[in-house]
Image (spheres, helix red, strand yellow):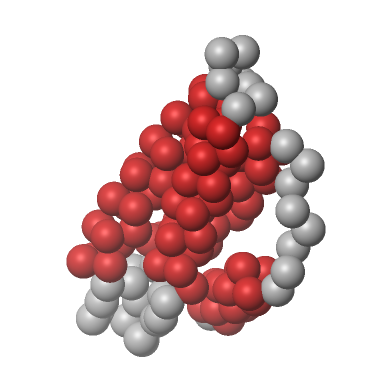
Amino acid sequence: MVRAPMLFAFAVCLSACSQIGIPAAKSPPQAVFEAKTAFLGAVRIANDYKSLPPCPTVTICSNPSVVVVIQKAAVATQAALNSADATVNDPQFKDGSVAQKAAVAAQNSFAAFVAITATLRTK
């Protein structure tokens, strides 16, 4: 099945991208936008894993308890990204330390989600 090697390759790629030095964003809104965009790629990997048949029915499968953890992490990450996006685009906070902290929170939330999806394994 082609899906399992692709899933592994995407996970390795995301993990590698999180390890190398990616240039810093120029502004808090850009940092949040980049985190939200990267999150979409990570969600794709999680969805590919979820679409595998549940274990132990076939050789390549997904663990239902892992799928639940991934779904909870995705919901939490999406909420953090949306909150950060609203904050950095609010004129009241746009240029202050609050916007910087919101951008860091968005990046950290995404990094945690990537760490979870990078550990996905198939049987």
Q: Residue at x 33, y 72 (%)?
A: 62
Total number of numbered labels?
0
Picture quadrant of residue 10: bottom right
Q: Is residue 114 left or right of residue 62?
A: right
**Residue 2: percent from left, percent from top:** 59, 77
| Residue in the image at 25% along x and 57% along y | 68
Pick the residue in front: 103 or 59: 103
Residue in the foreground of this view, choosing between 17 and 72: 17
Viewer-nearest residue: 113 or 71: 113
Q: Is residue 62 above or below residue 36?
A: below
State the residue lying farthest toward the front. Answer: 97
Image quadrant where residue 56 sits: bottom left
- 90 vs 24, left or right, is left
Residue 43 appears in view: no
Q: Quadrant of the C terminus?
A: bottom left
Q: In the rendered view, would you say 48 is above or below 118?
A: above
Viewer-side residue, 113 vs 103: 103
